[in-house]
């Protein structure tokens, strides 16, 4: 979610110089908050927006931007307060508030899910759906939590609703295929994987999962072709169950990271590392999250581990060097 652009303030007559200065200070705090938001420094951004609203409680953009941060963090109470205030000041209507709060509850659910608290995640997703029943991604997320609790029938229903809302969610088709395969509904599982691949031909895990089912039903040649395609797309060749699970947790970490859910991302990467300590990409990505949180020493340790495991992992070296260069420049100032 992009923070709204602040509209320019008209020039005032000289006789209004004192109010104008007060308004300029408000603008400065809002601008600082926006910059901190872009840097991922959310606590500091909230404090800047708070300064603006302390100077003038009727600055709706400050309330709205503050709500956006709370939404992204899954802090539903803070988001509701901020969005409601922005709505009362005429910045957004109540329908927008409901939509934004649905996203806040979804993000809260992602946090619970990353902690392995699937029941709490389902409750949060259900709240999001209550506020905005047309968010396909939330139905998909609810399905994943239900799946992890072994509630296959309910998970399929959630996935079907997500597909009804957005037929082009490749992840949902793959997730549905996984449940169908676990329930030995192999023909239906293959159809689901084929749909995921049709939407995203480079979906490596869908190719791999399809290969597993083809092998189970005795279509060895077709299975080998699917496994080969998965391998060409970067899927690990013949991984152990532990390695498969590590890859799944790594993928969850990437999703959390992309959603700026840093703590949940670190937990997911740590779980991947626990299952496969030699997964260099997980060490590298963990370092990236730590770096974005300003935890540079811990980030460098993580990058060092990635490089130790895979000396050819240029991304880890580049990320590490970027931190060292920034530290050097800061020390020169």
Image (cartoon, helix red, strand yellow):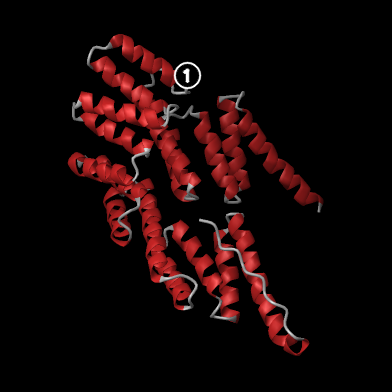
61 displayed left or right of 177: right
Q: Residue at x 32, y 19 (%)?
A: 211
Q: Name the residue carrying label 1.
A: 232
Quadrant into which the C terminus falls: bottom right
147 displayed left or right of 108: left
Residue extending farthest top: 221
Q: Is residue 69 above or below residue 202?
A: below
Residue 261 at least partly seen? yes
- Dot 1: element: helix
Residue 271 at least partly seen? no
- Say few, some or many: other residues with alpha carbon within 10 Å of mark 1 (under 14 / 14 to 19 / 20 or more): few
Residue 133 falls in image quadrant: bottom left
Q: Residue at x 60, y 29 (%)?
A: 307
From the viewer's side, name the closer residue of 322 and 190.
190
Q: Position of residue 264 (x, y in %)?
A: 44, 48
Q: Position of residue 23 (x, y in %)?
A: 66, 79
From the viewer's side, name the closer residue of 182 and 85.
85
Q: Position of residue 60 (x, y in %)?
A: 53, 74
Residue 16 falls in image quadrant: bottom right
Q: Residue at x 32, y 35 (%)?
A: 173
Residue extending farthest bottom: 15
Q: Is residue 314 above or below residue 24?
A: above
Residue 10 falls in image quadrant: bottom right
90 displayed left or right of 308: left
Q: Position of residue 192 (x, y in %)?
A: 29, 30
């Amino acid at each position: 979610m992009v923070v709204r652009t602040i509209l320019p303030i008209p020039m005032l007559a000289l006789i209004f110089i004192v109010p104008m200065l007060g308004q300029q200070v408000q603008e400065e705090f809002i601008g600082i908050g926006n910059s901190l938001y872009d840097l991922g420094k959310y606590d500091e951004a909230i404090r800047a927006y708070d300064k603006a609203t302390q100077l003038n409680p009727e600055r709706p953009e400050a309330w709205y931007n503050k709500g956006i941060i709370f939404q992204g963090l899954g802090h539903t109470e803070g988001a509701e307060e901020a969005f409601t205030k922005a709505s009362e000041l005429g910045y957004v209507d109540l329908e927008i508030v409901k939509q934004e709060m649905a996203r806040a509850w979804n993000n809260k659910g992602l946090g619970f899910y990353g902690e392995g608290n699937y029941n709490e995640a389902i409750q949060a997703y259900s709240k999001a759906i209550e506020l905005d029943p047309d968010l396909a991604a939330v139905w998909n997320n609810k399905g994943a939590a239900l799946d992890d609790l072994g509630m296959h029938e309910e998970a399929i229903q959630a996935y079907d609703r997500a597909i009804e809302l957005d037929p082009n969610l490749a992840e949902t088709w793959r997730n549905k295929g996984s449940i169908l395969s676990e329930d030995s509904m192999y023909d239906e599982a293959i159809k689901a994987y084929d749909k995921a691949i049709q939407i995203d031909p480079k979906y490596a895990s869908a190719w791999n999962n399809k290969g597993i089912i083809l092998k189970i039903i005795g279509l060895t040649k077709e299975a080998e072709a699917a496994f080969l395609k998965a391998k060409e797309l970067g899927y690990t060749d013949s991984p152990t169950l532990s390695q498969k699970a590590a890859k799944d947790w790594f993928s969850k970490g990437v999703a959390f990271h992309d959603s700026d859910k840093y703590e949940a991302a670190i937990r997911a990467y740590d779980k991947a590392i626990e299952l496969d300590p030699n997964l260099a990409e997980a060490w590298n990505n963990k370092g990236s999250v730590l770096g974005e949180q300003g935890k540079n020493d811990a980030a460098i340790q993580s990058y060092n581990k990635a490089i130790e495991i895979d000396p050819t992992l240029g991304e880890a070296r580049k990320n590490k060097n970027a931190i060292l260069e920034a530290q050097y420049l800061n020390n020169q100032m």
